[in-house]
Image: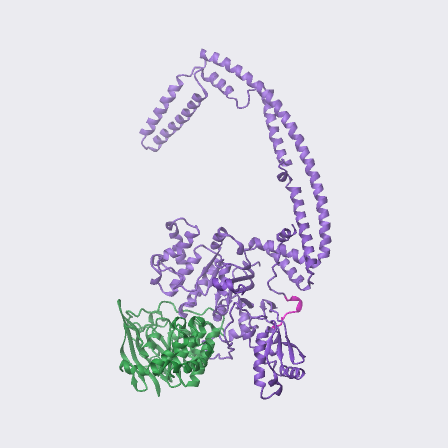
Amino acid sequence: MEPLLSIRDLKVWFPVRMGIVSGLFSKAERKDVRAVDGISLDILPGEIYCLVGESGCGKTTTGKAVLRLNDVTAGNVLLGTPEDEWKRLAAIEGRLRELRPTLRPLTKPQERSLTWYWGELQALKDSVIELAYDWPRVSGRLDADRLERAVQLLDKRVAELRTAVDSNAPRPLSRTSRKVEIIRSKGGWFTPRRANKMKVLETALAEAEYRLRRAEVTGSPTRAENRKLRRVRKKLELLRRHENPDDPQAISKLRSLEAKLERERRITRMELQDAEADLARTRERLEAARREEAERAGRAERAYRWIADRMAEVRKIGGRRLEYWELLQVRNEIVARFDLAKWDKSQLRELRKRMQIIYQDPYESLNPKFSIFDIVAEPLLANRIVATSTEAEAVVREALEDVGLKPADEYMFRYPHELSGGQRQRVGIAAALVVDPDFIVADEPVSMLDASVRTEILALLLDLKKRRNLTYLFITHDLGLAWVLADKVAVMYLGKIVEMGDGPEIIQNPRHPYTKALISVVPSPNPEIRREKTILRGERPNAVDIPAGCRFHPRCPVAVGICGWNAKEVQEELGGLFKRDASSHPTAQNFGDIVTDGPFKLHVVTGDGSAAERYLRERIAALGGERPALASIREIRADGGILHVGLHVPAEPSLRQIRENVWAACHLVEPELAPGAVGEVGPLPVPNQSLSSTRAIAR
Amino acid sequence: MAILEVDHLKTYFDTRSGIVRAVDDVSFKLEKGESLGLAGESGCGKTTTALSVIRLLPKNGRILDGHIMYLGKDLAAIKESELRRVRWKQISIVFQGAMNALNPVKRVSWQIAEAIVVHDHERAEDASARVEELLELVGINPARKDDYPHEFSGGMRQRVMIAMALACSPKVIIADEPVTALDVMIQAQILELLNRLREEMDLSMILISHDLSVIAETCDKVAIMYGGKLVEDGPAERVFRDPQHPYTQALIRSFPDIYGPRDLPPWIPGQPPNLLDPAPGCRFHPRCPYAFAPCPTVDPPSFEVGPGHVAACHLRAPAG
């Protein structure tokens, strides 16, 4: 099934505000709070997708970004991608994922010339297509289709004129012939206008007679009808008095009209000649245009084939690198069409009717100066679903009853402070659902409510989901709720998803150390369940300075050497080690300054290099297991009195598929599936140059 | 011997619309070194009970009746000047909402020292060593003592509130919703800290929370309040395993449990009673599925349902 909403590599960064003065004088680069730092997930229609994590992990920011209540820094949010497009996209993404690990980077000049050449060819191909098929538009000439239409029209006109000439009939639609006809039948007094008036009066008379008859049959008063009939009859009488077909006056009039008719017939014959000439000329032009088009198509075909050959050559040279690049273009084109991250204001108006949000705090999110009616009617009026408040009333009433505020009239004109917390949240839900959306972001909708009403509201949300076919992105910090609600769960830490997939599976069988710790500390009301808690030390790091490697490693209870320790952390660790060892290990006393050199290198000043190296190796072997920062030391090289220490250069763990419907981002979690079946949901790298920009560079 | 004994406490508020019976005839005991959980929905009188104990009620609140016995003294009856010697030095409180309970324009060190200066009559300079000691105790780097509250995270502010409560080495500490609005991980850290402090300093603690699972995991005894009354009181193990009052049963059931079945827990239909003019009889009877004849008219007394376990429900009346 294709997802209703699909998030791809979504990033929301907020710039850290700097004062003007410090901004001017400090050389510090611009810093960002990386609230959401590249997450990808697919939400199927009808699902409850729970986004869980501690405060500040980016769950609410994600929810708001999906609705475009936050600006999206990068990434895509696809809404309602049709099935075939989705399949194409999935196929392309699969191929891209396949290609990515096999790519050998090209040298810079190679890549530049290749992409330039490719861009040129693409541009050529486009212009060939344009010239071949849009030639008339480009040249300003009429194309064969239009000429053919002209020929048809001319044909018809010629035929008309010819019938008129052949039968010696008056010119089609001639007023003169009509005048003759009227005078012949009614007499010289009548003009077409007077004849028309008479016709109208005759119809009116028939109508008046009918009305009178109807009135008589139905027994209703006939006075008005009688009067009308008399009036019409009188007017008609006045006209009829002039009727006189044998009017001698008419004969002279007729004679001059006949002469006029004869003149007109002559003109018709001339017109026929002109039209025939026009037709012949247009036919010739049509032939020419057809010939030209065929020729042009042939030339375009040859050009196209030549370009295709060149492209094939380039493709051969570019190989997978180019295929990858090209597929990315196609993917981005598809994505751009359904990406609501790039929609403008008017499109967002439409979006509000499809996606809505339920806010966390019903005590804060309802305007205290608005009545319940105003609150629920506002989305209707703002989105111009109804024009006036009166129209909104029926809709609001239904929405309120739908969320269990029955009878609606009792609540409609009260104010939020008169309602309990649960009732207020019902109002918030009614306001979200009144525009009849199909996707709801529920941002901690019950966290401010008492336990006894909490489940009541959840039951309402579930009931509405069933009745209205809703899909929820449910944001919560409460894993207990996720346990009972979620079809799917994504656990976030510091702007990234660390584990996601099937809800019950993840909560019962967490694999990522962070998820494990989080679940272990959830309190249970059942006193029989007392288990080991993994309480993480400290608090989450600032989202401005996200740790290198795995962002969870500084707090991770099972971290190892490769998890992302940097020189600063190892510096501290070594300092502590030397201090502790000072009494037991004589060598430890000889260490001097520890200096960091870049993020993953250190220099340690010591007396005897080789002895120090031996000591350090020994200590790492002994302590590496419990002190992962020490285990991150990859190489030690003694150089006289200085010890050069190199660290593992960490890689951020990507979200890997562990088993069906479970993904985790941890170096220590190994896939439980056969190696071939494992996919990566990692964000696909965004190409640094789009096609158009390459072309721009080429020029 | 109980260190703190609340006996038939009645605390009412005078409001423009009438008298609000926030705490109506509540009795419980706190043994030395014990932790008591006070649970219930919002507006059930938990916080008012706590504030009554150290008489920090707002101006319109008054203790109408009852005794609060602390080591032989009745805190409800003694003079304010005498009470000051008990307040903070003997019984202290961690106020609700650590986010807002700290003064945003004063340094953290000053706010902790203030309690020491006021109650122990020490000079501020002398208090500084004690401040550092306290911060260390609650797990905050003492180097940060001169920071302002906004520079601290929610969890750290809660730690500061705890440090403040411990400033004068009290015997009893009342923690009013200490973990509400905190993340589960920070919640676990704070609860662990409170438990550790309780053991190390031999404290007795009253933990007020609306979250039964928190109380289930931290407290020895639990008292459930509903509509200003105590409906059930007993050892936590017993109460959670075998709740006797229908309200307690329903409340426990309404919490989702990640170790339980994957069903939406049942809720308690209806609204909590209005304490402005409570109806006679059991306050829970309009929402109680087992309500029967005497419930709407007779206020149920507390019946003993087990060792140290009482429940105020007519259903639990001994036969005969």
The quadrant the C terminus of chain B occupies is bottom left
Q: Which residue is found at the position 33% from the left and 32% from the top?
A: A219
The quadrant the N terminus of chain B occupies is bottom left
Region in magenta = A667-678
Q: Is residue B206 left or right of residue A657?
A: left
The main secondary structure of the magenta stretch is: loop
Residue closest to the eye, A481 or A594 = A594
Is A677 included in the stretch rendered in magenta? Answer: yes
Q: Colour of chain B?
A: green
Describe the colour scheme in one phrase.
Answer: by chain
Q: Is residue A473 above or below residue A618?
A: above
Q: Is residue B78 left or right of residue A648?
A: left
Q: Is residue A455 above or below residue B205?
A: above
The spot of residue A651 in percent (x, y) is 61, 69
The spot of residue B145 in percent (x, y) is 44, 77
Give the image quarter of residue A567.
Answer: bottom right
Is A410 included in the stretch rendered in magenta? Answer: no
Tell me the purple chain: A
Give the image quarter of residue B100.
Answer: bottom left
Residue closest to the eye, A449 or B161 = B161
Q: Is residue A407 above or below residue B165?
A: above
Give the image quarter of residue A431.
Answer: bottom left
Work out whether residue A521 can be spotted.
yes
Check the image and name the residue furthest to the front: A25
Q: Is residue B62 left or right of residue A253?
A: left
